[in-house]
Image: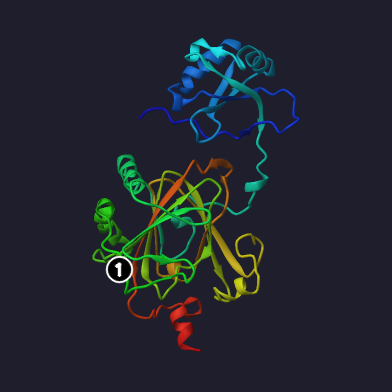
Amino acid sequence: MGPSPPKPSRFTRPKVGESQSSPNLYVANCGPAVGLSYDTIASVFRTFGEVKAVNPADGSGVRVIVSYAEEGSARNALESLHARPCLQLGGRFLHIQYSFLQTLSLVNDPLPVALMASELNIPGLHLLHDFVSLEEERDLIAAVDEMPWNNLSKRRVQHYGYEFCYETRNINAKKKLGELPSFVFPVLKKQSMFAKYGIPADVILDQLTVNEYPPGVGLSPHIDTHSAFEGLILSLSLAGPCIMEFRRYEDGDWNSKASLGFDMENSKTDSNFVRRAIHLPPRSMLMLFGEARYAWHHYIPHHKIDMVNDEVIRRGARRVSFTFRKVRTNPCNCDFPHHCDSQRDRTR
């Protein structure tokens, strides 16, 4: 195995008006996206002093953070290289500013983030790491990028099998769009891996929603409508990571809090629900069935940066998810009536 790629930077550009020096430099117009490796960049900046690290500044591939051991080295590099062509880096004009440790208050949340599903202790929740390979991930993303996207207010979606209506949070089972696309067949062929979790291998998933999340965009807390879909939900994460939070309310009422103006997304201290969170890395498959599917709200915080056990993880330029479900044709008779729209409607 080769060396691990540089970790996302914990530094940021200076605010307007900031002029104090720093041992860290924000360098634009160089990086792997323009054919310059981190080692090559480090070798150039090392001529001005000891370089502790060169890390990506963001997901663009054309901006880096160069961290020196001494502020004087950073100052000499900035004065020598800023706004001038650098012959050692292909004659590129570098744009350099001081960089500072990033304030992490926006992602400061005491909620622990699990790396494994077993840490959450939520029945019916499983996470399979590296469910698809890097090559399969590239093929899946390339396939959906060749298909037309539908624009929502903050993200883009594609629907296959049946279209999901966001206004009603349901589907029209009588209006089928067609079969699932052939490019997901390699994913569906791996369903035999679910048998050890008590999921029948012959479950035929017939609805697919593809979501594209740009940086900072998440998903509001919700339980997939019981009357719309049966008991298994699969979500494949591609291209970028995120944190997914799960909440279970003591009173089980999934509708009343929103109707009363309760801020379900931003509340972190309400004692009326239990919170759990897990990190979803690229190429992982999240499985929800039973209690996890029917009784726990799932939610993606609207962050550009996540804190995962004291490590800063940037969301990246995009995250693409494939959510597979089976359309329900009969009313839901699950064991969680307080969360179930089918059973609630029958009691009216």
Q: Quadrant of residue 286?
A: bottom left
Q: Is residue 292 left or right of residue 11?
A: left
The quarter of the rendered structure image containing the N terminus is: top left
- Counting from the top left corner in percent of width and height, residue 39 is at 47, 20
Q: Is residue 140 above or below residue 37?
A: below
Callout 1: 10 Å neighbours few (<14), some, many (20+)? some
Q: Could you say which is closer to the camera, residue 289 or residue 60? A: 60
Residue at (49, 15) in percent of width and height: 89
Total of numbered circles in the picture?
1
- Counting from the top left corner in percent of width and height, residue 320 is at 42, 49
Residue extending farthest bottom:
348
Secondary structure under the numbered disc 1 in the rendered image: loop
Q: How is the image coloured?
A: rainbow
Q: Is residue 207 left or right of residue 26?
A: left
Q: Which residue position holds label 1?
A: 176
Q: Quadrant of residue 249?
A: bottom right
Q: Could you say which is closer to the camera, residue 154 or residue 263? A: 154
Q: Is residue 102 above or below residue 21?
A: below
Q: What residue type is disc 1 on? A: Lys
- Counting from the top left corner in percent of width and height, residue 3 is at 41, 27
Q: Could you say which is closer to the camera, residue 130 or residue 172? A: 172
Residue at (54, 51) in percent of width and height: 217
